[in-house]
Amino acid sequence: MRYIKHFNENKIEPLEELEDFCESNLAYLLDELMTLYCTRDKRVTYYIQSGELKGQKVTKQIASITLFSNSKSLYWNDIKDYIIPFLQRLQPHVYKMYPNTVGHHTIKNEDYVHILYENDEKTYTLDQINSDKVRNDRNILTITIKVLIDR
């Protein structure tokens, strides 16, 4: 029933669109290794800093993409060949990533991917992910990525 649309429904809800994007791009991981949850997060408001719209106030909805491990032992090397291409397709062409504020660490503006390990957690930049500088000695419990879903 999830995929049946009402006769007058022209537009897909942004969160549902994000979930469809994630499911189609992470199909292998979602088959057995991980479970996907896409949820609404907070809204952010900011002012445009340059261009024709400079000074205008903009409010955007943030969504969290969370992947939960279904395995008792899931390591970075098991999933990196799926996560790295997914992130490359995600940013910046489809969704703009938002700095991740999950966890107990001081977050820098470019920290986008939060990984909760067994007994530890770390937030990584896209450069660290793309250059495979992610720890592989700990079991991964969850991966969280935040994106703006108002385009």
Image (cartoon, rainbow, N blue to C red):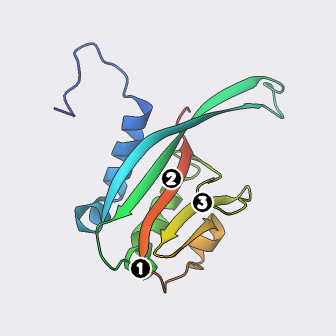
Dot 1 crowding, Cα within 10 Å, few <14, some 14–19, many 20+: some
Could you tell me how many numbered marks the image carries?
3
Say above or below: 74 vs 113. Answer: below
Q: Residue furthest bottom?
A: 137
> What SS does tag 3 mark?
loop
> What SS does tag 1 mark?
loop
Name the residue carrying label 3: 103
User: Taking 38 as reference, is 48 left or right?
Assistant: right
Can you tell which quarter of the image residue 105 is in?
Answer: bottom right
Name the residue carrying label 1: 75
Dot 3 crowding, Cα within 10 Å, few <14, some 14–19, many 20+: some
Residue occupying image coordinates x 43% and y 81%? 77
Q: Mark 2 is on which residue type?
A: Leu
Indicate which disc, 2 or 3, sits on the residue closer to the N terminus. 2
C-alpha gap between disc 2 and disc 1 = 22 Å
Q: Are marks 2 and 3 in contact (CB under 8 Å)?
A: no
Can you tell which quarter of the image residue 1 is in?
Answer: top left
Name the residue carrying label 2: 90
Of residues 84 and 42, which is closer to you in this image? 42
Q: Mark 3 is on which residue type?
A: Gly
Residue 55 in the image: state x and y as whole percent.
83, 25
Residue 80 in the image: state x and y as whole percent.
44, 74
> What SS does tag 2 mark?
helix
C-alpha gap between disc 3 and disc 1 = 19 Å
Dot 2 crowding, Cα within 10 Å, few <14, some 14–19, many 20+: some
C-alpha gap between disc 2 and disc 3 = 22 Å
User: Taking 53 as reference, is 119 left or right?
Assistant: left
Of residues 119 and 141, which is closer to you in this image? 119
Residue 108 in the image: state x and y as whole percent.
74, 59
